[in-house]
Amino acid sequence: MSPRIEITVTPEGETSVETKGFAGAACKAASKPYEQVLGTKAAERLTPGYHTTATVAQPAEQQA
């Protein structure tokens, strides 16, 4: 799944920002600009994706 940010606005005007496909704290960095524009945060719920670590590709070792 490619990373995405879903913003929901209810008929009452309440908003929620949900990140999907991010690993670790990258989700917070990605959603921060949207949260700032939408106003004061009433609550925060961290998904299991927040508690995973991002996989970093490492170059293969060269043999002499």
Image (tube, grey):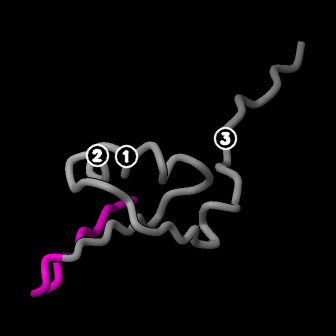
Residue 27 picture location, percent across and down = 48, 53
Left or right: 20, with 59 as reference point:
left
Task: Give how far apart the Cα atoms at labels 2 and 1 are.
Answer: 6 Å
Q: To which residue does mark 2 refer?
A: 36
Task: Give how far apart the Cα atoms at labels 3 and 2 are.
Answer: 29 Å
Quadrant occupied by the C terminus: top right
Q: Are marks 3 and 1 in contact (CB under 8 Å)?
A: no
Q: Amino acid at mark 1?
A: Lys
Residue in the foreground of this view, choosing between 63 and 52: 52
User: How many other residues sit within 10 Å of disc 2, few (<14), some (14-19) or many (≥20)?
Assistant: few
Residue that appears at 28% across and 46% down:
36
> Residue 41 lies in what quarter of the image?
bottom left
Question: Above or below — where is 62 with respect to 45?
Answer: above
Residue in the foreground of this view, choosing between 62 and 36: 36
Residue 26 among those drawn in magenta: no
Q: Spot the residue most to the left.
A: 11
Q: Amino acid at mark 3?
A: Val
Q: Are marks 2 and 1 in contact (CB under 8 Å)?
A: yes
Residue 32 numbered mark, or none: 1
Disc 3 or disc 1, which is closer to the eye? Answer: 1
> Residue 45 lies in what quarter of the image?
bottom right
Residue 14 numbered mark, or none: none
Residue that appears at 10% across and 87% down:
11
